[in-house]
């Protein structure tokens, strides 16, 4: 009988010793789960929300795009850091476009063979001037202001310019004369 009591006491003592261990392990697993949840929330807000919706841009963000001589007429160059394309028109003028489709904001690749921006989501397409070639995009690509100083191209990525049609005055040429307000005419 004493042997049974000793065994019962040992089992009870063993259960008491294992409780702190179990609660410690439960604490660790709960903490790891919360850290993983926090990472998922961080990734959602950092990468999945479109740029500009979760952050305010103020002032100007002049992005250097290189020398005028680096671009050949009819070429389109992607700037992934700036989220824009720089298009050198056939006549040597420059336009900068947002890399987002005006339909639902999908990222547009430039198709060199077809000379079109083709949306992978809903098949909208745009020409080198950013005009809609095929719907469902409701309007041309948003553009950014381009500035050329001393043979260097700068793109102001702080503000997208929404447009409804192409205006020849939007194209910036290297030989344009600067006016007093810093814009080219």
Image (cartoon, rainbow, N blue to C red):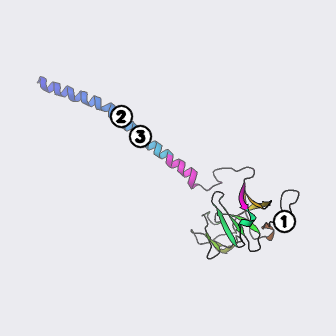
Q: Which residue is mark 1?
A: 176
Q: Residue furthest left?
A: 1
Disc 2 packing (10 Å; few <14; some 14–19; many ≥20) = few
Q: Is residue 61 magenta?
A: yes
Read off the magenta span.
39-66
Res 123 → quadrant: bottom right
Tell whether label 3 touches label 1 (CB within 8 Å): no
Q: Residue 7, image x and y in percent?
A: 17, 28
Quadrant for the N terminus, please.
Answer: top left
Residue 158 appearing in the image: no
Q: Residue 50, image x and y in percent?
A: 61, 56
The front one of 14 and 170 is 170
Residue drawn at the location 23% of the way across and 28% of the way down: 12
Q: Which residue is mark 2?
A: 23
Q: Which residue is mark 3?
A: 30
The front one of 19 and 169 is 169
Mark closest to the chain's N terminus, 2 or 1: 2
């Amino acid at each position: 009988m004493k042997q049974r009591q000793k065994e019962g006491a040992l089992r009870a003592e063993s259960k008491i010793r294992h409780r702190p261990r179990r609660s410690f392990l439960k604490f660790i697993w709960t903490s790891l789960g919360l850290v993983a949840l926090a990472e998922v929330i961080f990734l959602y807000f950092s990468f999945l929300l479109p740029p500009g919706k979760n952050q305010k841009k103020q002032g100007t963000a002049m992005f250097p795009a290189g020398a005028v001589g680096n671009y050949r007429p009819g070429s389109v160059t992607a700037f992934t850091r700036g989220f824009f394309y720089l298009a050198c028109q056939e006549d040597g003028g420059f336009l900068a476009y947002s890399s987002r489709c005006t339909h639902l904001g999908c990222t547009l690749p430039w198709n060199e063979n077809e000379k079109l921006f083709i949306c992978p989501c809903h098949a909208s397409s745009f020409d080198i001037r950013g005009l809609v070639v095929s719907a469902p995009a409701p309007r041309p690509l948003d553009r950014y202001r381009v500035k050329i100083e001393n043979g260097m191209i700068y793109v102001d990525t702080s503000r997208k310019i929404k447009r409804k049609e192409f205006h020849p005055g939007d194209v910036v040429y290297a030989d344009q004369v600067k006016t007093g307000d810093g814009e080219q005419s």
